[in-house]
Amino acid sequence: MRIGLLLVAAALLPGQIPRTAEGKPDLSGVYDIATLTPLLRPDHLGDRLELSDQEAAALAKMEAARMAKTSQASNPNRTAPPKGGDGSEGAAGNVGGYNTVWTDRGTGAFKINGKWRTSIITDPKNGRMPPLTPEARKRAAARVALARPNTGDAWWVKEGLNPGPYDDPELRPLGERCLLGFGSTGGPPMLPVLYNNLKQIVQTPNRIMILNEMVHDVRIIRMNEEHEPPEIRRWLGDSVGRWEGDTLVVDTTNFTDQPALTSATRYLHVVERFTRIDARTLLYQFTVEDPTVWTRPWSGEMIMPATEDRIYEYACHEGNYSFEGILRGARLLEAEAAAKAK
Amino acid sequence: MAAGAQQLPRLSNGKPDFNGVWQAIGSAHYDIERHMARPAMMLRDGPHGPLPAVPLLRLGAVASVPGGMGIVEGGSIPYKPEARAKREENRKHWIERDPEIKCYLPGVPRATYLPFPFQIIQNEKQFFIAYEYAGAARDIYFTDPGPPETDSWMGQSVGKWQGDTLVVEVTGQNDQTWLDRSGTHHTEQMKVVERYRLMTPNHIQYEATIEDPEVFARPWKISLPLYRRMEKDARLVDFKCVEFVEELVFGEHRRKKLER
């Protein structure tokens, strides 16, 4: 045991990374996982894992140009958008949604071992999720069919949907309800999203805490313990950890019926690996399996760079006026549809 | 005291080790002032004395308020007269006004003595408090970033060690939080200075000095013990009450309204 530890320590050149009093790599800190490297690899890149320097520079330049354009001052003489939106696709028919002040997608792709990456997913080789099971495909298709741009009318009434997608709060996505962030930001796996990509890690020998900026979700990883009994479910799952050499391995099960990760179910099982690669950077790797959803496990990796930014409180529920607006808006459209039908 | 201090768990930097799951015991979450038991959290006048307000009637003894010696030094809060009147008004409208009913973040110090455990995760550089209620969370800064840039529900916490005592100054809390279920209110001017002192391995003495010139005639103090949860499997479980209040907050906007 002692020899093994010494060998690992020698390979990583002790002193290059901060360590805790008990000699473990110190993962504590605040990290910003915003990145322009997408979760899913764009189709045209096929099995290519890496971007060239030129491609990465082009990606960063495109985002910088987009940010510069959307950061321009608004025309103070502009008029209200047309009723029901301008007809183009976008948040609520482009009457206005998130602006540039709000969003933070990062400024570039990320590098692992000095090479820019094309996607976070590394397995399957094409950087895409493996095929869904037939059942999961049906569920996903049903979900996609209900998620439509705002056409300004109660299309679900016309189509005789029962229930309609806006009938009850429980039918709306978790992000709208402020139960979790959207897009698996809290995870696990923790994935970059449109904004609020900071994570804070507080490490102790027995417990390691990860604070997710979005919806102030806290995950407390219990070290070297068994998973909780099946009656106890958690929105972010039950996480137990162990050290494999200098890597923190976190195993998460016991999810609720609706984990943060799209399509996943209570059978989701995620294994995450956190490795400190230098004084400012963690390597974050994960493997996801849910046999009721994907035909095989899939894996991804990214880096977690340290940031000097602070995490501000994201009190989602307390200010969730738009959720009432979503439901009331649907009731108005239904009333309009009923009036028209008369 | 010196002998006891030797036996406290400590981190490698010598600071007392507060890691663990803690909880207050008592009735402070109902009413931080010294108080006798009363029929309910919201009352109406009955023919022979106070009765539970109508919306609480069916809960019977479950809606009643247990008495207690209170956690306020001297027994009562030194309200300015108009602020005391507002507190009375808050009590009359408790069911519409108490932010706990809507699962809003609790603020400090209320988070400390809600009837839920909280967990301290502490190392040589960081001190973090995760509360079970509403998943509230606080990072205690040890480097003062200056005045809070914006108000928030849990405020900004800046800590420093005075010997073995962790002293935390909390500012920048919005005026939406209460201090108990009895309408104790404040403005965004409130400054709370908390003191966490480990008395034995399983017991913290918690004190907080509360200052808000808009509401109180002078600064005042609360103090109460916090106890370590001794169960072998002590931990926080999820209490995402946002889900539990959806019918209350949004139910009237359902397509098919339920009985309300």
Image: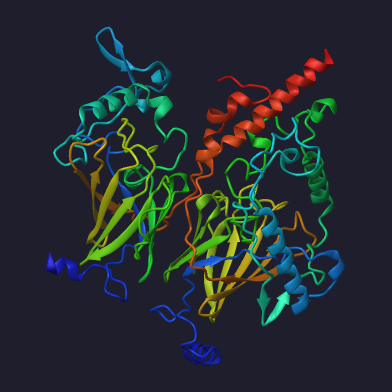
Closer to us: B151 or A225: B151
Residue at image position (59%, 27%) is: B251
Q: Is residue A119 visible?
A: no
Closer to us: B189 or B135: B189
- Provide residue A155's location: percent of width, then percent of height: 81, 30
Q: Is residue A172 visible?
A: yes
Closer to us: B217 or A204: B217
Give the colour scheme of this rendering.
rainbow
Residue at image position (49%, 83%) is: A17
Closer to us: A170 or A117: A117
- Provide residue A197's location: percent of width, then percent of height: 58, 59
- Provide residue A154's location: percent of width, then percent of height: 78, 28
Q: Residue furthest top?
A: B47
Residue at image position (57%, 50%) is: A235
In this rendering, would A230 be left or right of A327? left
Instruction: Say which quarter of the image contains residue A328.
Output: top right
In this rendering, would A282 be left or right of B165? right
